[in-house]
Image (tube, rainbow, N blue to C red):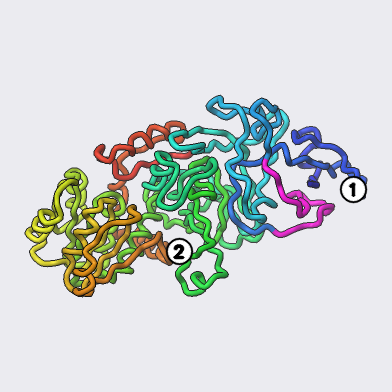
Amino acid sequence: ILGVFDSSNIPVRQISLVPTMASNCSSDSESCLKIDFNVCCCQYRPQGDVPDCDSHTKSKEGCEDKGSHRPCSKGPDDQRACTPSGKSKLGASGCLCPYESLEKENEKNNRCFSSSDGKESKKNDCLVLESANTLRLKTCDIPRPGNCEVLIEMKCVCISESDVSYWLHGRFNDSDMKEPIILGHEGCGHVVKVGPGVSVLKKGDRVAIEPGKPCWSCSKCFSGRHNLCPNSKFCGTPPTNGMLCNYFVHSEKYCHKLPDNVGFEEAALIEPLSIAFHACTRGNVRMGKTVLILGSGALGLLTLMVCRAMGAASVYVVDTIKSRLERARMLGASGIICVESGQCIKEMKKMVEKAVKTKPDISIVCCSMENCTKLSLLITETGGKVVLARADHSEIKVPLFNVATREVDVIGVFRYANSYPKALAALKNGKMNLRHLITHCFKLDDAAKAFDLLKDSQNNAIRVLIECK
């Protein structure tokens, strides 16, 4: 691969990637160097198209030919690993190559250049899940934004249920982790550099990051349901790396500028808030409706706030943890019902009927308890709707005849679709305060403690926030 640099900006002696004179280069300039990229790769390659350039065109930004970049396969003792010292921040030697098969456009662009002494280039600390129950903080070079991309200094990232599942089991639902990955998809930060073609954002802008990147060329994308795109790339979901790092590159079109009155802590919760908006929209929540929410975790509480904002007449919340239910009451729940995890369906149904007094028009499942899913199907009003905002079970036994004969609509929810603007507008207008949902905060260096905290659902944690910078 041929890289061309302006010697006035990058002295030849500072390039650490084994520079040699290109034997096939027609230029007489000493700034034309042949660089072996096989000895280096960055920790992640964000999505985005990078235009090809002529391999011998002199440019301050540098250029590359169309060859693909092969992640390094050097052993842990090879001194030419991705970090100048060949060691991670925690002392584990070896380079960080989370995965080898990536989009071609990412392979073309996201290369990092470090100085030979390792002092002039800032480093990017990343929380890498190497395998189930194995998290390591590793250091890599800062990536360069490509065409229509921006480099973001990450400020806050919230840990979600999927992050914990990948950490504990190496999988989440039907998505398996096959290679090391950087977790985190609920993040925000401010722009520190813009790539070519960026027209809206500028350096210094505070942004919330929309983690999903659909292909925009399939039938689902054309119909407006881009969350169902089979070719979508989603941050923190294998094989796409996430945001638990100091610096992150993302496409400009999926970076939403934050209103002045919205802080980074709230911005880190816009992604789950968007899911709540999508669930309520799918369930047709509107004025005068009675809603039952099953589960008072972060998603359940956000759904409660959205139902209130949409004008629901009454909203009731069911859970097994009293402290979470009290938080739901504080956020405006019409009533709370505390059930036991091993309680039979009939007893749970009686408790809900006694508290609600009328069957809910809409039930929204926001927890992973199998009995709660069954309860929602039985308790919902005839002709009503059951929205599965969270469904962690691949198979459950349901009262299908009861549901069919009463024409109860069962509606699935997958992530979000076209709801980021709604979430941002709600925060800008001051209709909801999300800070109440952040119960714990950790630095990136202590992120492993945050995962340990979330392992036990009884510890009163709602959303745990990681300060990345």
Q: Is residue 339 above or below residue 16?
A: below
Marks 1/2: CA–CA distance: 46 Å
From this viewpoint, is residue 231 visible? Answer: yes
Residue at 33 percent across and 45 percent down: it is 463
**Looking at the rendering, which quadrant does residue 312 occupy?**
bottom left
Query: x, y (%) of residue 124?
Result: 57, 38
Q: Amino acid at mark 1?
A: Cys
Q: Nearer the viewer, residue 371 or 213?
A: 371
From this viewpoint, is residue 188 visible? Answer: no
Residue at 21 percent across and 61 percent down: it is 376
Q: Nearer the viewer, mark 1 or mark 2?
A: 2
Quickly name the residue at label 1.
25
Residue at 79 percent across and 45 percent down: it is 5
- Horizontally, residue 7 falls left or right of residue 270, namely right
First along the sequence among labels 1 and 2: 1
Q: Which residues are magenta?
A: 51-71
Helix, strand or loop: magenta stretch = loop
Query: x, y (%) of residue 452?
Result: 36, 34
Q: Amino acid at mark 2?
A: Asn
Image disc number at residue 227: 2
Q: Is residue 451 above or below residue 47?
A: above
Q: Is residue 234 above or below residue 214?
A: above
Residue at 73 percent across and 30 percent down: it is 116
- Horizontally, residue 422 falls left or right of residue 340, namely right
The answer to whether residue 17 is magenta is no
